[in-house]
Each structure stands twice: as C-alpha cells, then as structure tokens.
C-alpha cells in the first residue's frame, strides 16, 4: 500500500513517470545515463506491478507501447 488512498491511485500516479523514463531512456545516448534511467524504469514498473492494480497494468502497457511506437516511427 502507498500513502495514497488506495493501490489504484498509486498505480495511476506512476504511469506518467514510467512513460517519461522510457522516453528519456530511448532518447539518450550516454550509457551511464541509460543504465540509471533503465534502473529507475524497472523500479517504477515493479512498483506498478506490486500495486496489483490491473487497470494500472493495462494503462502502463498501453502508454509504453505508444511511446515505443512513436519512437520507432520517428526513426524510420
């Protein structure tokens, strides 16, 4: 549980930072920064997973898929 009112609220809160971390991870070229951003992203995803909020799982999967799609579309 979080200090928020319920696990669903924590899961919903963590979606935006996780999405931003993936976008920064894909954008940066420095390997040290990529390791730091990748670790922070893994921690955020683990926190979302441990909320047991199925709606947060679906939302973060959709958000991360959209960021990946946008990144891959920009490269080609």
Image: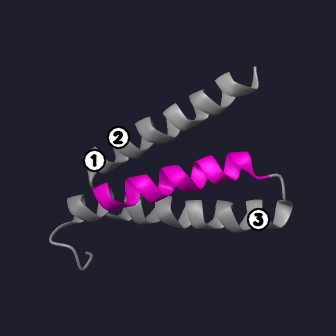
Q: Mark 1 or mark 3, which has the lower sequence index?
A: 3
Camera-near label (2 vs 3) is: 3
Residue shown at 21% from the left, 74% from the top: 4
Residue 7, picture quadrant: bottom left
Determine the CA span between mark 1 and mark 3.
30 Å
Which residue is rendered at x = 59% and y = 67% of the image? 40
Residue 54, disc: 1
- x, y percent for residue 64: 51, 41
Q: Residues within 10 Å of mark 2 (few under 14, many from 20)?
A: few
Q: Is residue 52 visible?
A: no
The reply to whether residue 41 is in sight is yes
Residue drawn 75% across and 26% down?
A: 75
Determine if the magenta segment contains residue 42: no
**Quarter of the image where one finds residue 69:** top right
According to the picture, the residue beneath numbered tag 2 turns out to be 58
Residue extent of the magenta highlight: 12-28
The reply to whether the magenta stretch includes residue 17 is: yes
Quickly name the residue at label 3.
33
Residue 42 x, y percent position in the rendering: 57, 61
**What secondary structure is found at the residue carrying circle 2?**
helix
Camera-side mark, 1 or 3: 3
């Amino acid at each position: 549980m979080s200090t928020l009112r319920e696990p669903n609220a924590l899961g919903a809160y963590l979606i935006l930072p996780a999405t931003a971390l993936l976008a920064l991870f894909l954008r940066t070229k420095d390997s040290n920064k990529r390791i730091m951003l990748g670790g922070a992203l893994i921690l955020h995803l683990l926190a979302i997973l441990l909320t047991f909020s199925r709606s947060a799982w679906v939302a973060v999967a959709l958000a991360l898929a959209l960021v990946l799609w946008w990144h891959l579309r920009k490269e080609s």
